[in-house]
Image (cartoon, rainbow, N blue to C red):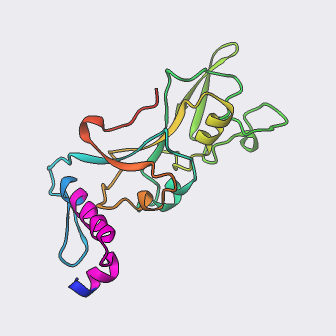
Amino acid sequence: MNDMDNKEQYGNSPMARRKFLRVAGSAIAGGSILAAAGGLIPRAKGREAVHYWQIDPHKCTQCGRCETHCVLPVSAVKCIHANRVCGYCDLCGGYYRSNVKNLNTAAENLTCPTGAIQRLFVEDPYFEYTINESLCNGCGKCVKGCSSFGNGSLYLQIKRDLCRDCNECEIATVCPSDAIARGPLSMAYKLKE
């Protein structure tokens, strides 16, 4: 990449230069560096990164872009269930779609399009909800339902073991609420309490 390409991509304004330095700085801090040709050189094997991409559950608007904009074929973003917050309701807004005519577990009545949320009867009227991460695609429909009709115990988070830890997270670039940012390893997951 020559100087002319840099000017076209980042411009010549102070704000554009700050953006370039922020991207380059977070790439170096995250254990990866920008190649001279503008590409990505992954961090060396066995070297642990000190910063990870994560979602602030209080800023997330469940826009659906986590499912469609991740560089992986199935998004590294997964639904997380905050058990301590959950009410274990029979009528869970994250499990059932709103305005269902029959309260049964038929696919057309469920919020999750992949069947990732599983429920287990505890005692009347309580159910335990778990997330099957291998089925979750990070669409956020269950999170939106839980926030609208429940207590918000479901939320989205980027799973460290699945994330490629790109220099500039593709989802972060399109996130309308600026909910995705790099965070230190000591705070690897922002939890919803």
Q: Nearer the viewer, residue 44 or 28?
A: 28
Please provide percent x and percent y for residue 150: 65, 29
Does residue 39 appear to the left or right of 104 in the view shown?
left
- The residue lying toward the viewer, choosing from 77 and 7, is 7
Magenta stretch holds residue 112: no
Query: In the current view of this chain or complex, which residue is farthest to the top?
Result: 123
Res. 116 image quadrant: top right
Q: Is residue 37 visible?
A: yes
**Residue in view at x 50 percent, y 24 percent:** 83
Q: Is residue 132 visible?
A: no
Vertical position of residue 40 compared to residue 115: above or below: below
Q: Residue at x 21, y 59 (%)?
A: 25
Q: Is residue 33 left or right of residue 53?
A: left
The part of the image, by quadrant, that contains residue 42 is: bottom left
Find the magenta span and give its range: 5-26
Residue ID at (41%, 62%): 170
Residue 13 drawn at (x, y percent): 31, 74
